[in-house]
Image (cartoon, rainbow, N blue to C red):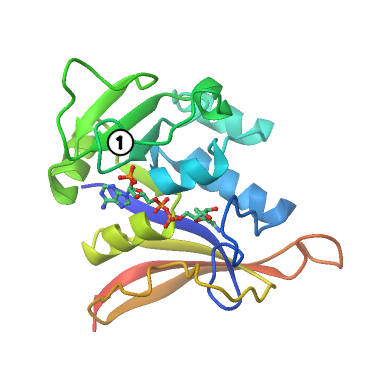
Amino acid sequence: MSWLRLVLAVSLDGRLAPPAGGAAQLGGPADRRVLEEALAWADACLLGAGTLRAHGSSCLIHEPDLLAQRLARGAAAQPPLLLVSRSAEPAGLDPSWPFWRQPFERWLLAPEAAAGGPAPGFQRQLLLDSWPGLLGRLAEEGLGRLLLLGGAQLAGSLLAAGLVQELQLTLCPLVLGGPHTWLPLELELQPNHWTLVEQRLLGAGAGPGSGELLLRYQRTGNC
Ligand SMILES: NC(=O)c1ccc[n+]([C@@H]2O[C@H](COP(=O)([O-])OP(=O)(O)OC[C@H]3O[C@@H](n4cnc5c(N)ncnc54)[C@H](OP(=O)(O)O)[C@@H]3O)[C@@H](O)[C@H]2O)c1
């Protein structure tokens, strides 16, 4: 079975974007490093179509030591990007976005079968019939380490299905307010418990990104 790690930068009041929404960039350079470490760990990344619509691109590994680590273990320099949509032809994807030129494989995961091959711009399209079924098939293909890049709606679906094993949150010293909580407000979950496995102060000093805290938790189970 796959191991699914959710990685997010969140404000002190639990927001993942400012009140106006849009392309949120909450973390500083040290958060960027831990994000790239998580990308280097991953066999593949999952991204909600809403986050792609906000950014027009996804995250890449730039750090040479992390790229070298992946190449040394025989992995592609960048993990494949699995875009998640409820449609086999997601609306509002602009062909001029950098996303289409980024150096990773693009797969589409949608609950409708691809008629006549993957949607334009994607190398593969997989049927999202059920999350456990799909994650099982990905694990069989050797994609056992999955990084969930958000956003809130997709994270909510996978947490509700009980399929997220790990949370990697960078707590950023910002208080943002507004509606963009890191899980949808209407989401109802069974009470559950997580064990802290790592805590790291990021960006010591007074520069941009100082005072960020990396918190990594693994799921212990339901209460
Ligand atoms: N701070 C951070 O670390 C961070 C990380 C990620 C995102 N963000 C921010 O979060 C905001 C976007 O978040 P969001 O919650 O609006 O968007 P999202 O979760 O990225 O995307 C929502 C879309 O993803 C697809 N989707 C979600 N769950 C699905 C499911 N269970 N099955 C099939 N498709 C599913 C649907 O796409 P279709 O509409 O195509 O059907 C849905 O409309 C942006 O402001 C972004 O900057 C912040």
Q: Is residue 71 left or right of residue 85?
A: right
Q: Is residue 195 left or right of residue 13?
A: left
Q: Secondary structure at mark 1?
A: loop
Location of residue 57 with respect to 148 vertically, above or below: above
Location of residue 193 with respect to 209 vertically, above or below: below
- Where is residue 86 shown, x and y percent of the image? 25, 43
Kindly identify the amino acid type of the residue bearing the numbered disc 1: Leu
Q: Is residue 48 visible?
A: no
Q: Quadrant of the C terminus?
A: bottom left
Location of residue 24 with respect to 47 vertically, above or below: below
Location of residue 102 with respect to 144 vertically, above or below: above
Q: Is residue 157 left or right of residue 146?
A: left
Q: Is residue 120 left or right of residue 118?
A: right
How many residues crowd mark 1 within 10 Å: few (<14), some (14–19), many (20+)?
Answer: many
The residue lying toward the viewer, choosing from 165 and 121, is 121
Instruction: Give the residue furthest to the right.
Output: 206
Identified at 37% across, 68% down, the residue is 184
Identified at 45% across, 49% down, the residue is 149
Image quarter for residue 188? bottom left
| Total numbered labels | 1
Identified at 57% across, 78% down, the residue is 13
Which residue was labeled with disc 1? 143
